């Protein structure tokens, strides 16, 4: 299957700082990328969907000004958690797929664990 | 909301087949059945998907009932490394537009020695 990477794999930051997480598709061009969040013992929750060159579409309840998503190229999307607070501590997972006429499989990155102190 | 129902947890003996059921009684004709798994503290891993026919790959087999209201993922010879949460997800594809993957709670499979 296709490979999606994330960087960093974990990050600890102070409350009020901003954190940027990168998501890259290594061996395919991802026209669509997704960001999920997962709290302990819970399932993945979709935060937003982004298409290359377009603004992201955020799920209900996700603050777009707090979670800035940039999908500037076909292999890179970034999620910036602005003014992070302890309640933003979570496991953030990106995902990517190729858009096309056929049903395409979505591949996931290894996740980034964020701890806000 | 997830459109599937799965048992919360299952156990399986190492070396035996693991059969994970999924109910998707409201599935529409445009929706595919996808299976992913998530090993602790990792991102989800794609396993297999199907529309109507049974499917097999190097990881697993997917059996979809004729009415498409349920399916079973089969891991033919479970190993300890197959211990994970398994998610059954229905995803729409219609008119060139693909729906989002919405995760439910999944089934926690524990493979025991």
Image (cartoon, coloured by chain):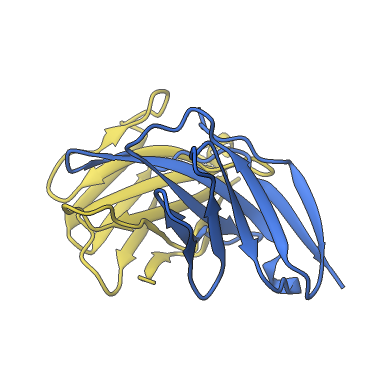
Chain colours: A yellow, B blue
Q: In the image, A8: left or right of B84?
A: left
Q: Is residue B109 left or right of residue B28?
A: right
- Residue B111 appears at what percent x and percent y? 79, 65
Up-down relation of residue A3 to residue B66 (above or below) = below
Can the viewer see residue A12? Answer: no
Residue most toward the left? Answer: A53
> In the rendered view, would you say A54 is above or below B45?
above
The residue at 24%/69% (across/down) is A28
Q: Quarter of the image for the N terminus of chain A: give it.
A: bottom left
The quadrant in which residue A81 appears is: top left
Left/right placement of residue A109 relative to residue A105 reads right
Which of the two residues, B22 or A54, is positioned nearer the viewer here? B22
The C terminus of chain A sits in image quarter = top right
Q: Residue at x 56, y 45 (%)?
A: A90
Camera-nearest residue between A35 and B62? B62
Q: Quadrant of residue A23?
A: bottom left
Furthest residue to the front?
A: B66
Residue at 73 percent across and 67 percent down: it is B17
The image shows residue A18 at horizontal and vertical percentages of: 40, 46
Residue B43, percent across and down?
Answer: 52, 59
Task: Using the image as rendered, state which of residue B68 and residue A2 is in the foreground.
Answer: B68
Name the residue rendered at 35%, 70% in the picture: A2
């Amino acid at each position: 299957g296709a490979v999606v990477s994330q960087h960093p794999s974990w990050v600890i930051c102070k409350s009020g700082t901003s954190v940027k997480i990168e998501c890259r598709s290594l061996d395919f061009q991802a026209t669509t990328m997704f960001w999920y969040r997962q709290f302990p013992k819970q399932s993945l929750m979709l935060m937003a969907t982004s298409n290359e060159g377009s603004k992201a579409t955020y799920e209900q309840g996700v603050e777009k000004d707090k979670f800035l998503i940039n999908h500037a190229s076909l292999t890179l999307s970034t999620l910036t958690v602005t003014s992070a607070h302890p309640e933003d501590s979570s496991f953030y997972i990106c995902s990517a797929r190729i858009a096309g006429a056929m049903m395409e499989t979505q591949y996931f990155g290894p996740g980034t664990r964020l701890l806000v102190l | 909301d997830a459109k599937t129902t799965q048992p919360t947890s299952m156990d399986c003996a190492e070396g035996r087949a693991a059969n994970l059921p999924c109910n998707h009684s409201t599935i529409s004709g445009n929706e595919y059945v996808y299976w992913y798994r998530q090993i602790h503290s990792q991102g989800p891993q794609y396993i297999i998907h199907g529309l109507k026919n049974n499917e097999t790959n190097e990881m697993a087999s997917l059996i979809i009932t004729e009415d498409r209201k349920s399916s079973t993922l089969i891991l033919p010879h479970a190993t300890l490394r197959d211990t994970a949460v398994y998610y059954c997800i229905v995803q729409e594809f219609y008119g060139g537009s693909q729906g989002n993957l919405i995760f439910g709670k999944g089934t926690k499979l524990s493979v025991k020695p």
